Structures are given as C-alpha cells and as structure tokens.
Image (tube, rainbow, N blue to C red):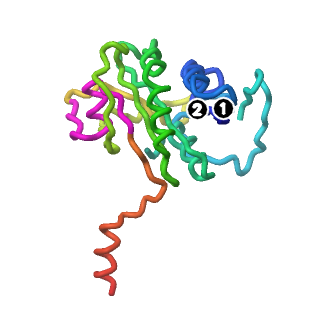
Amino acid sequence: MRILCTNDDGIHAPGLKIVEEIARALSDDVWVVAPELDQSGVSHSLSLNDPLRLREVGPRHAEDVVYSGTIAGALEGTILGIPSFALSQEFSMETRHAPLWETALKFGPEILRKVIDAGVPKNTVINVNFPACAPENVAGVRVTRQGKRNLGFLKVDQRRDGRGNPYFWIGFERLAQIDVPAEGTDLAALAARYVSVTPLRLDRTDEAFSEALTATLK
C-alpha cells in the first residue's frame, strides 16, 4: 500500500512528522508532498496563475469542513478515487505551543487500519480528530457528524502600514461565553475527550430540500 502524506502547515511542520509516523505504522511505502510555507485556511486553492515548483528536501519528501487545508488535501485524494483521511490534533490554550502528539500516535494507526479493512466508500473522506489530552485520558472513539464551530472568536483588526494606508488582519479573541456543542458532533466528542471519526461526502447536495424545491417549482 502506497501512502501519500500532505498538510496545510508546511513541509517542516511537526504535525506532518506525526502523520508520517502513523503512515509508516501501516506501510513502508510512504511519500510526503507538502507546501513550503503555511497554507492554513486556503481550502481548495489552485495555483492557476503561478508556476508550481517542486523540490526534494529528503528521500520521498517534496514541497508542493470549508476552510481547512487539511480537509481539502484529503478531499483532493478522494476526488481522484484514492481512500483518504484527514488527521488533526486538537490543542487547548495550555497545549497551543506543545500539542500532545502522542495521542494521535497512539490511536491513529489502529483507527486507520480498522477503517481501511472495513473499506472507505467512494467519494467519502474520513476526518479524524484527536482530543487535546494525554493518551491515557482519552475516553474512547466516537463516530460523529460534522459540527459547527462558533466563529464569534474571530475578530478583524484594522491597522495602518508605514504610509498610513489601512489594512486588515483576521485575529482571535477569547469568548466571554462558550456555546455547548451539539451532541453527536465532532466538537462534542472532542470536548468529552473522545477521538472523533467523521465520514464526509463530496456530494453536498441537500436531498431533502431538493425534494421540496421539486414540488415548489413544478
């Protein structure tokens, strides 16, 4: 089994090394292709107007939910018909600068093996999120649905450059009140210290509303 690893944080990001280690627990044919610089939040951006330059930084290492570049990378594999997983290690304010990578390392290989053995449906990507706690504190594994994060923590700072021209920077701020995530979602599972496994489909068609529209537009 040949495995391709990618990310949105860049070729030298520590999390990519964890993903590669998980992949090597499943196969000895592992390749890493990732962007040179951080591309978080770019989703499915394509290099349409600029050349795509590739350079080798080591043996088998080369550079290359809506915003996530992590999800987008896995979705691109799924579009090409390749079974794909998106792996993310959650971090808290306390672990922001030192994520607990050992949690992903402990649970990642076994989860991937079981899902691969069961078979990943065509046009489905598996999104796996590991909670921000030590491995021994993980409560278990839950199959979940996609949750909706409260974006109230985002803020837009207006600043001025050296010439006095305005520019804007997306930032973050602490929320006075944190909404409780809906039960059954990936966010609720992570909050309860479970590993969440969420199957995501490429087809975003709203079947229920399509039926209602059909009746309305007859």
Identified at 41% across, 31% down, the residue is 129
Q: Where residue 162 appears, x then y in whole percent?
A: 59, 26
* Residue identifier under label 2: 7
The answer to whether residue 143 shows anywhere in this view is yes
Identified at 65% across, 36% down, the residue is 1
**SS at circle 2:** loop
**SS at circle 1:** strand
Q: Where residue 71 appears, x then y in whole percent?
A: 50, 41
Amino acid at dot 2: Asn
Do labels 1 and 2 touch, CB within 8 Å? Answer: yes
Identified at 31% across, 29% down, the residue is 190
Callout 2 crowding tier (Cα within 10 Å): few <14, some 14–19, many ≥20 = many
**Is residue 124 rendered to the left or right of residue 214?**
right
Q: Which residue extends farthest bottom?
A: 218
* Residue identifier under label 1: 34
Count of labels in the image? 2
Residue span colored magenta: 178-197
On screen, residue 190 above or below 214: above
Is 188 magenta? The answer is yes
Amino acid at dot 1: Ala
**Is residue 184 rendered to the left or right of residue 110?**
left
